[in-house]
Image (tube, grey):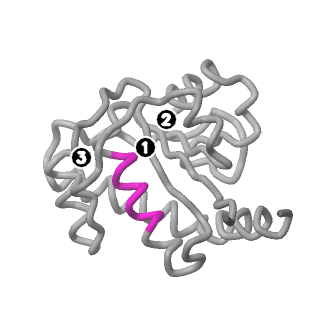
Amino acid sequence: MENKYNILIVCTGNTCRSPMAEGMLRQLLEEKRPNKFEVFSAGTAAAAGFPATLYAIEAAKNWDIDISQHLSQPLSKPLIDRADLILAMTSKHYQEILRLRKDAKSKTYLFKNFPHTGVEGEDVSDPIGQSLEKYNETFLEIRDYLTNNLDEIVKRIDEKATNE
């Protein structure tokens, strides 16, 4: 069986930003590299088994992305180890990933810095508790960053496939 390229997206509660980013990235990559990747998400302060927020589901639905079946999961060492690429929504998430696994630094990026390394940079703000309009803004922000960096992610998927 083919070894897929695994992408982990990390936020706080795993009910807003990371599920929206997971759904968006999955849709983008299905068009470019079907069956060559897996995208999953987790939260640094997430409880297990909670759905995405209603507004996150609604914002994603505006772009024909269904995250209604999403269930939250806490960030863990096994998830970090499984990932080939980790995208952290904020510098605090980035630091928590490295606290759990110092050796994950080479594959961990601040979402808005990718593909550049380092923890200095702009965070993706958390829309939790805010309006649907704010969720839509956050979704578009996530979509823009993923779209702008899609070629780099596809390149990494291809490199892993070539090196096997």
Secondary structure under tag 1 reads loop
Read off the magenta span: 17-26
Q: Which residue is mark 2?
A: 90
Near mark 1 (Cα within 10 A), the count class, few <14, some 14-19 or many ≥20, is some
Secondary structure under tag 3 reads loop
Question: Label 3 vs label 2: CA separation?
Answer: 19 Å
**Residue at the right extreme, as displayed:** 163
Near mark 3 (Cα within 10 A), the count class, few <14, some 14-19 or many ≥20, is many
Give the residue type at disc 3: Ala
Q: Which residue is mark 1?
A: 124
Q: Which residue is mark 3?
A: 52
Task: Estimate the x, y position of residue 70 in percent, counting from the top left.
Answer: 29, 50
Q: Quadrant of the C terminus?
A: bottom right
Please tell me whether residue 82 belongs to the stretch shown in magenta: no
Q: Is residue 113 left or right of residue 136?
A: right
Question: Label 3 vs label 1: CA separation?
Answer: 17 Å
